[in-house]
Image (tube, helix red, strand yellow):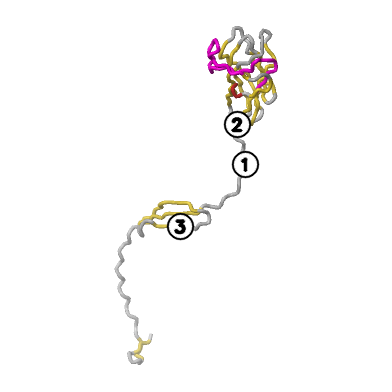
Amino acid sequence: MCCRTINGDDGGSCTNGTNGLNGTNGLNGLTATVSVGATATLPHGTPPIITNTGTATNAIFNFSIPEGAAGATGAPGADGNSGVSKTFWMLHSTKEVGAAFTLQMATTFTNMAIYGYQYFQNPAALNDQWSQTFSLSAGSYSLEAIGLTSTNRGIITWELDGVVQGTMDYYASPGLVNTIKSIGITVLTSGVHTIRGKLISKNASSTGYFCTIQSFWIKQ
């Protein structure tokens, strides 16, 4: 290396100076913390927003994130269960064949019925018929009915969707209130069904075709 004088003259060769001493170490920085604060959903297409509600060394970030685009419509779900039991009241029955229904309260009975009334077609006749519509799941069930037996009661033939399920003979001597009878029935498909009661026969000892059940129900 060539050194020159202040006047520009060639002063001959020169050597590098020695390195300076290292500086002292700086002070340790402050310990910082980062945590998540509130989160919110923004409308689709809105830019996300992140804000610090804390300090430079103790940050608390709040996130507002836009919702995603609506997905494609999914396939229809399977039909829900139509239920596994059903209770019916004769008061809700629809007369199909025969005379209109008569409502008779318990105060006119000799004995008290559990539901306090009778609801029956009057006058009663052969081929009297009534029905109710309901929803139920497919399966095997018990059909039960509560009513008053007597010497002028008919035999109820029960149909489900036009298929005979069985019969209940409400003839008795002497008669008895709150008599429960039952048969087994089969529901072939889940959905809406029609149950129908028909008075198409009677006990040989009966003097009539009256049907004075108060309620009936289907259960598994």
Task: Examine the rendered structure and indicate whether residue 213 appears above or below residue 40.
Answer: above
Q: Is residue 114 in the magenta section?
A: yes
Q: Secondary structure at mark 1?
A: loop
Q: Secondary structure at mark 3?
A: strand
Q: Is residue 58 above or below residue 89?
A: below
User: Residue 49, which numbered label?
Assistant: 3
Disc 1 crowd, CA 10 A, few/some/many (<14, 14-19, 20+): few
The span picked out in magenta is 102-130
Q: Quadrant of the N terminus?
A: bottom left
Q: Quadrant of residue 78?
A: top right
Label 2 belongs to which residue?
82
Q: Amino acid at mark 1?
A: Pro
Residue located 57% across and 14% down the image: 179
Q: CA distance from mark 1 to mark 3?
A: 37 Å
Pointer 1 residue = 76
Q: In which quarter of the view is residue 77 placed? A: top right
Question: Could you say where residue 4 lies in the image, as x and y percent from the top left?
Answer: 35, 89
Residue 200, how many percent across, how many down?
70, 16
Q: CA distance from mark 2 to mark 3?
A: 48 Å
Residue at left offset 48%, top offset 51%: 41
